[in-house]
Image (cartoon, helix red, strand yellow):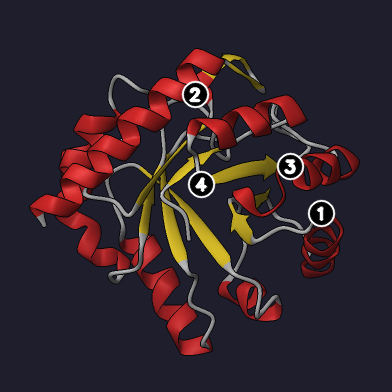
Amino acid sequence: MFRVKICGITSVEDAQLAAAAGADAIGLNFYSGSPRFCPAEQAKAISAAVGPRVCKVGVFVNASADEIRQVVESVQLDLVQLHGDETPELLRSIRPLGVVRAFRVSDDLSTASEYLRQCHALMCVPRMVLVDAARAGQYGGTGATLDWNWLGKNRVHLGGLPLVLAGGLNAENVAAAVEAVRPWGVDTASGVESSPGRKSPERVRQFVAAARVALAAAAVRK
């Protein structure tokens, strides 16, 4: 599992930047509809460049089980992040791959709660759940934020699984978000970019530093 993830990595340079800044995970997006899409061959180069220094998370949207397995093996991914409309049955079909299940929410966790109930019944519970802000017709990476206070009060509906908070996080707001939600980890893409898919060295370093301080402080207060 990871605590601080920089998602939407598209170059070796940005992957090495994230690792050097202290992020313990990077996200490689295999959804062709994303401005942060990373072709498999480029992802292989990125994975090889960072090696075991960071957790390599593959982000998929409505890919087939066979496609996911093929990319995991080719790129040497550590975790699979499902960010689309994948069913619990899909999670079962890709066992024993480690899964981060993303949920796009606004003000209701009932759908996520029922989804996880089905995963328990099928014995395919994800290792982590990621909560992102919902935007109609989009699968994430929008830069929109959640109501953190609401999520903090209602996270019990996620079954106690390690929670990764995403959605519009940056160096300026991550401390407040962590204080309100008390997540296991945090994830950002647009909040550390100079343009979609291109990371800002200064923003990455600032975000990772702020996130680590906030997560450590939250752990002390528990």
- Nearest to N terminus: mark 1 or mark 4: 4
Q: Mark 1 points at which residue?
A: 75
> Residue 93, relative to residue 206: is it above or below?
below
Observer able to see residue 27? yes
Displayed quadrant of residue 158: bottom left
Q: Name the residue under label 4.
A: 24
- Mark 2: give few (<14), some (14-19) or many (20+) Cα within 10 Å: many
The reply to whether the C-beta atoms of the residues labelled 2 and 4 are less than 8 Å apart is no
Looking at the rendered structure, the secondary structure element under dot 2 is helix
| Residue toward you, 13 or 141 | 13
Q: Mark 3 to mark 1: distance in Å? A: 15 Å
Q: Name the residue under label 2.
A: 204
The reply to whether the C-beta atoms of the residues labelled 2 and 1 are less than 8 Å apart is no
The reply to whether the C-beta atoms of the residues labelled 1 and 4 are less than 8 Å apart is no
Q: Between label 1 and label 4, give the one nearer the viewer.
A: 4
Question: Which amino acid type is shown beneath numbered disc 2?
Answer: Val
Residue at 43 percent across and 39 percent down: it is 134
Q: Residue furthest top?
A: 194
Q: Between label 3 and label 4, give the one nearer the viewer.
A: 4
Question: Which amino acid type is shown beneath numbered disc 4?
Answer: Asp
Q: Residue furthest right?
A: 41
- Nearest to N terminus: mark 3 or mark 4: 4
Give the number of the disc on residue 31: 3
The reply to whether the C-beta atoms of the residues labelled 3 and 2 are less than 8 Å apart is no
Where residue 136 appears, as percent x and y from the top left, is 50, 35
Question: Which amino acid type is shown beneath numbered disc 1?
Answer: Val
